[in-house]
Image (cartoon, grey):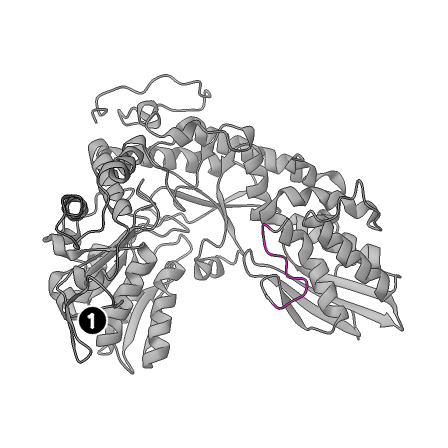
Amino acid sequence: MADPKSMYQEVILDHNRKPRNYGTLDHASHHAKGHNPLCGDHLSLALNLDGERITAIAFEGESCAICKASASMMTANVKGKTRQDAETLIQEFRDMATGQLDTGKQAHHLGRLTVFAGVRDLPTRVKCAILPWHTLHAALHSVADTSTESENDPMHAPIGDA
Amino acid sequence: MNMSQTAIEAAPESALTPQPATAFDVERVRADFPILGARPGGKPLIYLDNAASSQMPQQVIDRLVRYQMSQHANIHRAVHTLSEMATAEYEEARRKLARFINAREEREVIFTSGTTESINLAMHGYGRKFIGAGDEIILTTLEHHSNIVPWQMLAEEKGAKIRVAPIDDAGELLIDEYEKLFNEHTKLVGVAHVSNALGTVNPVKQMIAYAHARGVPVLVDGAQAVPHMKVDVQDLDCDFYAFSGHKLCGPTGIGVLYGKAALLERMQPFKGGGDMILSVTFEKTTYNVTPQKFEAGTPPIAAAIGLGAAVDYLSGIGLDAIAAHERALLDYATALLRGMPGVRIIGTAREKAAVLSFALEGVHPHDVGTLLNEDGVAVRTGHHCAQPVMQRFKVPATSRASFAFYNTMAEVDALAAGIRNVQKVFC
């Protein structure tokens, strides 16, 4: 089992202290609110799709360090990418966090997002890391509100399924 | 158990650690709890999550084993010896619980699955029969969700109204405001004896007297009180008192609803089934008397007997000695955390029991919990099923250390050291 303290390495703490793309977007084409009712984490995500490309993205909210850093790094990663690329990252991030993708052995496009791989060993924190991605998925699919606890949501990731 | 006269043994504690004010042999008590020697995650366990669930001493574990090995059968059912033995042990557990809270009669102790079911039983058995449209139920901001949601369900069903007594910035109930809520529509008061989120001890005796002067019965949620202080339901004069076994060094799946016999007799059953009836035909069923009227189906027999052993164990140590040791732990922890920059204690009532909720500046409670766990310190983080309390203090969640009599001053030091480590990570 990875040292859980590795979750709190400098890159994550830095994004927690100085989140990138933090704020709101005027005239966003897509937006969604994400909520984890189990811990109270919530965030709002807004983005602009120009054709198939994400040209602008911003988030704000109140959450733990893992969730906020995940949101910050997510926005930095998907800005400028196509919807299809973002969907791929969403799936890969979710698989990594729930232990279904071993980033050391399998091909992926996650880059530095692999700093979140250790969350798979913290079952109660998996949802913290996934919530921003869950919310991005909802925004791209024009679902205004999403929750880590909504069973019929395709991104629903029950605790312990890792 | 005889431990009251033994001086505390010298432990490798920091220079900051004061000697507890009580002559209480905590090391000897700890030896009764096998789990305190466990190393979850490879680290010594510093268990400060007792408000969520307490640990079980060997005496209770042994009692459960003895029951399962030599006394188990269904109760109240058969003429064979084993069934009679199980029935006798189950009813003996009821007697022990009645004595533990000083109930007038054994039949005033109803076994439930826990505090939540106890309150739901009162809601269905009393509330649904005696509370109607336009009636009012008084609760407090300090309530656990289990003493809010059942009453909201009732209010919705009947068209009744919930009124809430507020708290101040220390987490103390505003008694004047509580008293102002009463009117001719008030039909019930529900109040926590001790707040699970803040540790505030409510002046329930005074609150009950005020309600009774207006003919209003009172249900006390005692889940966080019975493990920490001597509770006397006759002295309090409460109408209902609810608590759980697993916070009391007993098993999960068992709890108690105490109710005054006269009230219980007037109530309707909550669950229908076997054991709660005297006779059944398809035309008419005649209910059994209390407490059987409220204990449909096969109860958790082993858990009830285990809880009986748990209250024997606690009584052997003495609730006064327990309260004194926990008071010393809480005072020491409060003083330590007060002296730490960036730490805010949430809940500073004058009367508190065994709970220390806190927030660290710039660090979310879930990060606090994960990092404390790294140091082997088990605390609870979250809203503690008391979201109205969180809203009152404008925090999404808190970290909560909660103590039991088997905790030590050295463990409080470990909590403080763990908090400093969290702050180092986030500085």
> Closest to the observer: B16 or B139?
B139
Residue A157 highlighted magenta (yes or no): yes
How many neighbours does mark 1 have within 10 angstroms: few (below 14), some (14-19), or many (20 or more)? Answer: some
Q: Residue at x 21, y 60 (%)?
A: B240
Whole-percent x, y for residue A73 in the image:
78, 52
Element on which disc 1 rests? loop
Whole-percent x, y for residue B386 in the image:
43, 58
Check the picture and name the quadrant holding the N terminus of chain A. Answer: top right
Does A66 appear above or below A53?
A: above
Query: Does the image show residue B289?
Result: yes
Does A124 appear above or below A140?
A: above
Residue A71 highlighted magenta (yes or no): no
Q: Residue at x 74, y 69 (%)?
A: A139
Q: Residue at x 37, y 71 (%)?
A: B152
Quarter of image, res A115: top right
Q: Residue at x 25, y 66 (%)?
A: B273
Does B42 appear above or below B216?
A: above
Query: Does the image show residue B427?
Result: no
> Closest to the observer: B275 or A13?
B275
As drawn, the residue found furthest toward the front would be: B80
Q: Amino acid at mark 1?
A: Gln
Location of mark 1 (residue): B268
Whole-percent x, y for residue A85 in the image:
85, 60
Magenta range? A152-160
